[in-house]
Amino acid sequence: MAVCIAVIAKENYPLYIRSVPTQGELKFHYTVHTSLDVVEEKISGVGKALADQRELYLGLLYPTEDYKVYGYVTNSKVKFVIVVDSSNASLRDNEIRSMFRKLHNSFTDVMCNPFYNPGDPIQSKSVFFCAHTLSIFYVTIH
Amino acid sequence: MSPAQWDLPPELCCRPMAFVALTGLDVVYNAIHRAIWDAFCANRRADRVPISFKVLAGDHEYPKCRTKRTSYEWYIPKGILKTGWMNKHLNLVPALVVLFYELDWDDPQWKEKQSECATKVEIVRDKFFSHRTSLQGRNTKVAVVLIQKKTPLPPGEDLVASERASALCGACDLSGKSLFVLPHTDHLVGYIIRLENAFYEHAQTYYYNEIRRVKSHKEFLNKTTHQLLFVRHQFKMGFFSELKQDTQNALKYYRTAYVLINELRAHETNMLEIKTMAGFVNYKICRLCFQHNTPLDAIAQFRKHIDLCKKKIGSAELAFEHTAWMSKQFQSFGDLFDEAIKLGLTAIQTQNPGFYYQQGAYYAQERKQQAGQLCGHEPGVGYPAPDPLETASGALDFYGQRPWRQGHQSIDPPDSEKEKQGILALQVKERDVLHSELIIALLSNAVAQFKKYKCPRMKSHLMVQMGEEYYHAKDYTKALKLLDYVMCDYRTERWWSLLTSILCTALKCSYLMGQVKDYITYSMELVGRASILPEEQKSRIEKNLIKVLMNEVPEPEPDCDPVSVKAAQSLWSDRISLAGNNEITIEVQDYAPFVQCKAKFLSPSFHIDEPVQLHVYVRADCPHPVRFSKLCVSLSNQEYNQYCLLEDASKGKDILESSSQENMCLVPGKTRKYCFKFVAKTEDVGKKVEIMSVGLMLGRETGRYVYLTWRGGWGDAASSHETLQASRCFKKRTRFPEQQVDWDTVSIQSSTMIISRVPKISVQLTHEPPTLTNEMYCMTVTIQSEEGTVAKDLKLTAGLKPGQDANLTQSTQITLNGSEVCDDSHPALLPDIPLGDLQPGQKIVKPLYIRCVSTGSRILLFHVAYSVSATVEGKDITCKCHKDETVTVETVVPFEVAMKFVSSKFEHLERVYVDIPFLLMMDILSASPWPIELVNSEVQLASSMTAIDQPMSQVEGVTLQTSECASECFLLKCPPVQNGTSTVASGHYIISWKRKSASAETSMVRTIITLPHVMVENIPLYIHAELPSFGCVRESLPVRYRLENRTGLVQDVEISVEPSDAFMFSGLKQVRMRILPGGEQEMLYNFYPLMAGYQVLPQLNINLMRFPNISSQLLRRFLPSRIFVKPQGRNGDTSIEAA
């Protein structure tokens, strides 16, 4: 299911990026990076028209032949990106939403950690984060 | 097969238009015919009917029509669509043949011409039909156009014409609708447009019939053997509908065709044919959807098409054919999409042609990879002979078939040996395809699109791919150019993983091209903290970097093309042997190299008598220690640079050799600190010294070296963010052992001020504020030296501090001389009053006098400057010191003077009367907080006033305390004035005063006050009384009233005295008299007081007959109204008097 999960800082550099080890890591990095074009566009669009709307989920950013890229942006403009295999047609929108919610919760946990300096890359050994993101991957594998 | 075998045929991609053939026109030699032809085909605008015209000879051979079969029972189709079919109907088989013939209705040789025309029609017809009566021929109609010289008459009027027309129709076997007349007159284009509209109608009928004809075949077909024909017929109907310009129906037929194609039994032998046709039909559908402005339908159709065909790979040995086809599908859809956008469609960021080009490029890359795997034959395997791809006609009969087994439709190939040869031939051909060119073309198309739709990151990504493709294509220059262009985007966005990957490719390119500078730059970044390479890779790159710096050939990068490596090695050896071009300067702010630097002044300002201290911190992130040969700081004043320089003394030695100066070796992860000190120049006092740059030299000055420069003394592409993060971090820092510094805690101070030495003198001011307006205010400046040596050239600048209200400058004067009174010629600021030298402990007292003309507060400045010699770091310098004292002084008015005119009875006067005395009263109210001594006062009268007696100051020598008041008055009178009344100036009042101060001698100030103007009036009659100053009860009081006529007229005056309780009187009670001009009349009364105390005198009523407006009230003001009456003394009155 999810083949790549990324947390991107407000300034658009990666805080955390993890993909299934079977495929090229670099490819996913590029996919996530290019998807930021759409995220930026959507955020600026929201700023103009729907300022009061508190929808954080940005939906499908763009489809490629093999993957679907979904986006989510927190109020502090930290972005989450989840890449899903295109062949997986059974994945519903609300499942993606719940993945993002989980990711957001675990990110909040990381931010609450007094030893974490906001803006630093999130270490994958971070207990809070790992448990939740692994569960996303876990859901995705089964 | 050409390399463009996957391109769609042009006849598929064009817009089909009805084909009409024109015969009988000689466009080469006949000018009229030429003009007609031009009118048909030149400058066709969009609003003309869609027809493609062609001029053909009268006896042109049209494609033969095959005999139509009556039964399909035993017919097995050989393929889906013949390759020539579309072209045939577009360009070869006309919907209408038009015969042009020059014939006027009144032609003298009508009969002969008519039969010639009929023959020509016959010839054209013969080309279509072998037997005229046969129904199996083409449905193409023939039309005749008569080119006439005369303008025709309106229909019905020319009887000859209608008669001959019907005769001609009969002779040519034409219907009346197929005969046209074209008068060759001025309105040629108009006639032509009418003609072509008629042709268009004929053509539409033709294509309509063609569709019906194809449709009629359907009933003969069966689903088992004629599957291919179902597709073919739907396609043909679609195509004819397009020719008929019926795009809605065309789309319907094509959609059916597409469904039918997917129902075909697909196997390895016909997979290519099915895909080819599916691609064609899909192209037509998408094209029509875009044309109908339903782009979403087009996209949906294309997605469906791709999903259906993605898995139809076909022969595994020819897998590259599938990817090539897929690539082409995406590309042609991208082209269609782009074309639609050019015609006005709006695309969005997430749905634009770029994505299709990009996907096309992916498939092209996959094709290249598969070609690499499948076509890697042994060198001995050559192209098979005879060529299995050769066909008898040189072209294929059906689209998408194999040349070596055309028309073969069963599952297994007929000849396995031929099949093998064919596949081999295709593989060998594929080997020669320039895949990179195809990929790059698609990528650059995609780049152009993403640029348009605001996808900068996607664009960068594609450019990286282009760069990598150029690298694979061994075009390293272009590769490097592209990679270098996008690198900074990834660097500024801090995507280190992507940057590292790009840098690795770029490093390979620069190695293979022997580009020393690029090689060094990329290596430095790859070794440093911005790279995510594993340690051993970094180590390898660092070793190579050191080799290059030592002017040696670096080891080749891994995974490079061995041939290119060979070439590169020789390039590098050439570079090594060549002298010169060995100095490379790198400005680090655009990179993130492995050496970091921070330079700071220890303080934001330094006094001139202390050394300026500067620390430079350097740190390396590379895996191995690195040695540098020079560290220099460039400051804004170049003269200091020599003091901020660290150089390796052991010049020319081996870079790796351990030198005595351990100091110049950077150990990974450790921060080194270098301290510099210098004495600032005295002329730099008050100036800023800035770190312009810090330079670090790696390598040897004698050999090859890299000079890294940090502009402003710190910072590369990554450091600003790192500094921010470090500042945010509140973690407890690990304690560092002594001599070591935590890099993150080093702050930046890239400039410092050189300020003057701290003065060791005291400046004291003694004065008594506030100042009084106009006074010479004394301020005493006391300067005492606390220096250890002589303070030379002491100079005092005193006065109004510059930069205040401009009016203050006008109203403030300062002088050293207290005895004179300042005026406008004195300045507001006295600059540089020389005070000589001051010995240690000596004191100078200097009084200064300031005159403030206006009130308000002023800031006064007292600036003492001097120079003193000092020794800094064993260097003698002359320091200029200065001390400023400022004081804010208020200015207030010393006193207020109120003036008024009163009558001799101290009554307030609105106006004064000529020759009648009055009083001028002055009230001086002190407003000063300090006592004021009034030295003198004086009235300077104007000519219109005269003093009655000698005016003497009555306030002379009076001292006024705060808010005390002094008054004086002067008795004055006005000489006569010209007119009855006029306003006259009174003169000036001059007060000489001084501040009464215990401490200092103050000088006198003269304050001049202008007296107010007053109104003077003539009075016709003056009356005054002469009476004693007091009376006694029951003692007679003689009163004499004197009346003066002040006019030139005789005046009648009526006088009466009113009785009073307090007095009895004798004299005229009521009298009327006449007073001559200038004359005087006396009236004598004897009043006899009856009561003691202040008593009102009997009131005198005076009535002037000539001047009724002068009331007795007014005149009475000149007379006393009351008198004090003493009580009657007892006996012994005399004794009281004596007492």
Image: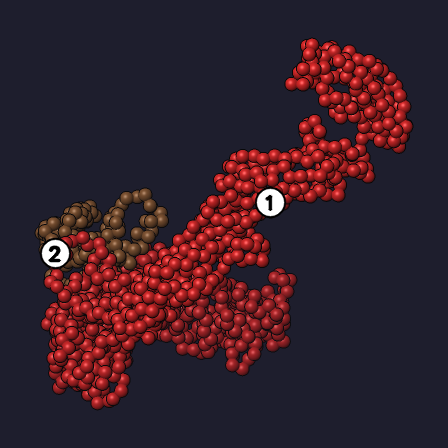
Chain colours: A brown, B red
In percent of width and height, residue B1091 lies at 70, 11
Horizontal side, residue B144 vs residue B361: left or right: right
Q: Quadrant of the rendered structure where residue B556 is?
A: bottom left
Horizontal side, residue B697 vs residue B1004: left or right: left
Q: Quadrant of the rendered structure where residue B622 is?
A: bottom left
For residue B220, the mark is: none
In the picture shown, does residue B972 fall above or below B309?
above
Q: Residue at x 57, y 38 (%)?
A: B958
Q: Residue at x 20, y 53 (%)?
A: A118
Q: CA distance from mark 2 to mark 1?
A: 94 Å
Q: Quadrant of the rendered structure where residue B207 is?
A: bottom left
* Pick the front one: B85 or B1077: B1077
| Residue highlighted by disc 1 | B992
| Residue B443 visible to the viewer | no
| Residue highlighted by disc 2 | A124
Q: For label 1, count other residues whose C-alpha is less than 10 Å away and answer few (under 14), some (14-19) or many (20+).
A: some
The answer for which chain carries disc 2 is A
Horizontal side, residue B697 vs residue B1112: left or right: left
Q: Residue at x 22, y 76 (%)?
A: B646
Horizontal side, residue B1041 vs residue B1094: left or right: right
Instruction: Look at label 2 and name its amino acid.
Output: Ser
In percent of width and height, residue B35 lies at 55, 75
Of tags 2 and 1, the one toward the viewer is 1
In the picture shown, does residue B813 fall above or below B121?
above
Q: Secondary structure at mark 1?
A: strand
In percent of width and height, residue A54 lies at 28, 44
